[in-house]
Image: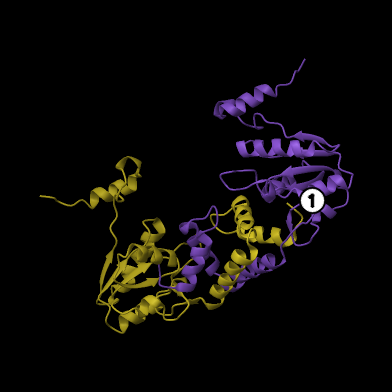
Chain colours: A purple, B yellow
Amino acid sequence: MSGTTEIEQLIVMLSRLPGLGPRSARRAVLNLLRQPEARMLPLARQMERTAQSVKTCSQCGNLDTVDPCNLCTEPMRDHSTVCVVETVGDLWALERASVHRGVYQVLGGTLSALAGCGPDDLNTRSLLERIEAGGVKEVILALGATVEGATTAHWLQEKLSAYAVTISRVGHGVPMGGALDGLDDGTLAAALMARRSLG
Amino acid sequence: MSGTTEIEQLIVMLSRLPGLGPRSARRAVLNLLRQPEARMLPLARQMERTAQSVKTCSQCGNLDTVDPCNLCTEPMRDHSTVCVVETVGDLWALERASVHRGVYQVLGGTLSALAGCGPDDLNTRSLLERIEAGGVKEVILALGATVEGATTAHWLQEKLSAYAVTISRVGHGVPMGGALDGLDDGTLAAALMARRSLG
């Protein structure tokens, strides 16, 4: 490196982000340093504002600058259908696809002995409160098709069976646009199991 | 997205960086937002400090927080050998490899009609001043093996021919660890031209 502690330090910090390594962090910093006032400073300040204003929604666990979050307070949202996801990233993915008209519940993880994540670590209380307050008709489990996702779905299903709500899970199968050739055995088995009669 | 303008805005700004797209920008922001105070805020402040303190070295064109830069003032640097590079990124690459004991000159680009970069846009004045002040014995042209790099090298060679300095250029050939099979014709031709007798 160039012996420049400030710049080096910034590169080290950026290179710790997922998806970036030392090489891309260097490229990003060099790119920003072409216009430090016009590009790097606004990015720094936006990051600072975001860090200072971010809140976890007390209703659903989404990240936003207001609590309750903009999704929970959005008019026209169907509060009787709650989609349960593992992470905020999953919530954003569903929102980008505009496939869910209801509200969400972000668990913040899955049950995993390996990751040391037990039932108490999952954000389920606000879901139960919403169900107990009445008004929730369906809970859609949109958890990953992994061992942890399935374990969590099973546990949550048991937990919610005490309430008068419909519980469903997202379908498994061949991804749209995907060829069967490249898929793993588990997906192929799930797709066959989930077959529909066309007759 | 989640309707969150602050977070969205940050993702948009990050996704404009080279090497990042919307997807990796989202991942990076979500990762930082897990610890806004402990991780995002320090990164924002480091970025702000860097943007506010960065300077272009008046001697060599390197980016640093001091002028002249730490490389130009580093003791034991051989000021009689100047390595000419296109960008600060190239300078950093050579420094990481620890292959040059002398000082540098960062041109800030190459001659390119397409990019609208002419002789006046290149940072050569401080190089000529250093040569005129005496003490420079060799100028090593470490420019890219591209049409623009070669054009710039040729032009610089002409310009420096008026001075009593040795002008050299970095060698071209097969990259270390590289197989001949994957190389382009130009590299293979250059490697053959640069052959050495082992006898």
* Residue depicted at x 70% and y 21%: A195
- Left or right of residue A152: residue B194: left
The quadrant in which residue B158 appears is: bottom left
Q: Which quadrant is home to the C terminus of chain A?
A: top right
Q: Which residue is mark 1?
A: A126
Any part of residue A98 in sight:
no
B82 vs B199: above or below: below
Q: Residues within 10 Å of mark 1 (few under 14, many from 20)?
A: some
Q: Position of residue A175 (x, y in %)?
A: 65, 32
Q: Residue type at mark 1?
A: Ser
Front residue (pair A98, B190): A98
Any part of residue B50 in sight:
yes
B131 vs A82: above or below: below
* Residue depicted at x 36% and y 56%: B145
Q: Position of residue B135 (x, y in %)?
A: 27, 81
The quadrant in which residue A49 appears is: bottom right
The quadrant in which residue B154 appears is: bottom left
Which chain contains the residue that carries disc 1?
Answer: A
Q: Secondary structure at mark 1?
A: helix
Front residue (pair B119, A198): A198
Front residue (pair A10, A116): A116
- Left or right of residue A68: residue B165: left
